[in-house]
Amino acid sequence: EIRRSCALIPGFHLIANEIGLPLVMSEIGASAGLNLNWDLYALELNGQIWGPSDANVRLTPEWRGPLPPKANITVLGREACDLNPLDPCNPQDRLRMMSYIWPDQRQRIANTNRALDLACRTKNVVHKEDALAFLARRLLPVSGATRVIYHSIMWQYLSKDAQAEGEAMIAAAGAEATPNAPLAWLRAEADGQRGSAAITLNLWPGGETRDLGRMDFHGRWVAWNGA
């Protein structure tokens, strides 16, 4: 669901604005990797655009709360994992992805097709790999860049033991983070509140949990706290 980038993009801008370093992106549970291309999408909020103004993929959620910060973002690298990744260039995989969209949602269908075309061109790497094995590699320090671990509506599919181990791995890497090799953990995940997901950020050094707001599970609206 590319509209989940409506909640993630403001978080990436917040991270880049506060840290001021390039980003190294790592997404868990990425499916076909469409949300790896978030910086190539245009997020339109109250007449302003976050991202390239000429982007073919345009996200227009109902926005509640203050506008997020803007930052000049450089992405140094991006990889993802999924237990069963889909290929955006494969017609059968594309058909499977489109089958989850109601046929009367024409704008959503058109936008998703454009995102699939873009992903087919960019050919980002989505490893067929378990989340914990992926984290073990991607949590290694990167000098002069912010490592960003992110995911949306997937943590619930991990076992309780895997969730605990993943959280411990991220916290341990965060404890070793430095101003020249910081770590961010951004997610939009269910937390028991019906009808929406919590948008949460931890940023190390420091590591306090920050409540950034909430989003509709499909990204139709975002309630931003401006934290």
Image (spheres, rainbow, N blue to C red):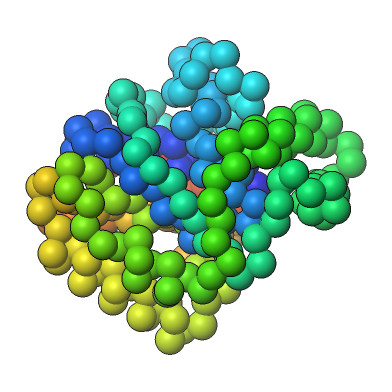
Quarter location, residue 162:
bottom left
The residue positioned 43% from the left and 46% from the top of the image is 78
Residue 45 in view of the camera: no
Q: Is residue 219 left or right of residue 163?
A: right
Q: Residue furthest bottom?
A: 161
As drawn, 204 above or below 172:
above
Q: Quadrant of residue 141?
A: bottom left
Total numbered circles: 0
Query: Which residue is at the front of the view, 156 or 146?
Result: 146
User: Residue 69, position in %: x, y?
Assistant: 31, 27
Residue at position x 33%, y 30% in the image: 74
Q: Residue placed at 56% from the left, 56% from the top? A: 126
Camera-side residue: 77 or 35? 77
Q: Where is residue 116 shown, x and y percent of the image?
A: 70, 39
Image check: 161 left or right of 69?
Answer: right
Q: In the rendering, at what x and y percent does residue 32 appear? A: 65, 51
Q: Is residue 80 above or below residue 17?
A: below
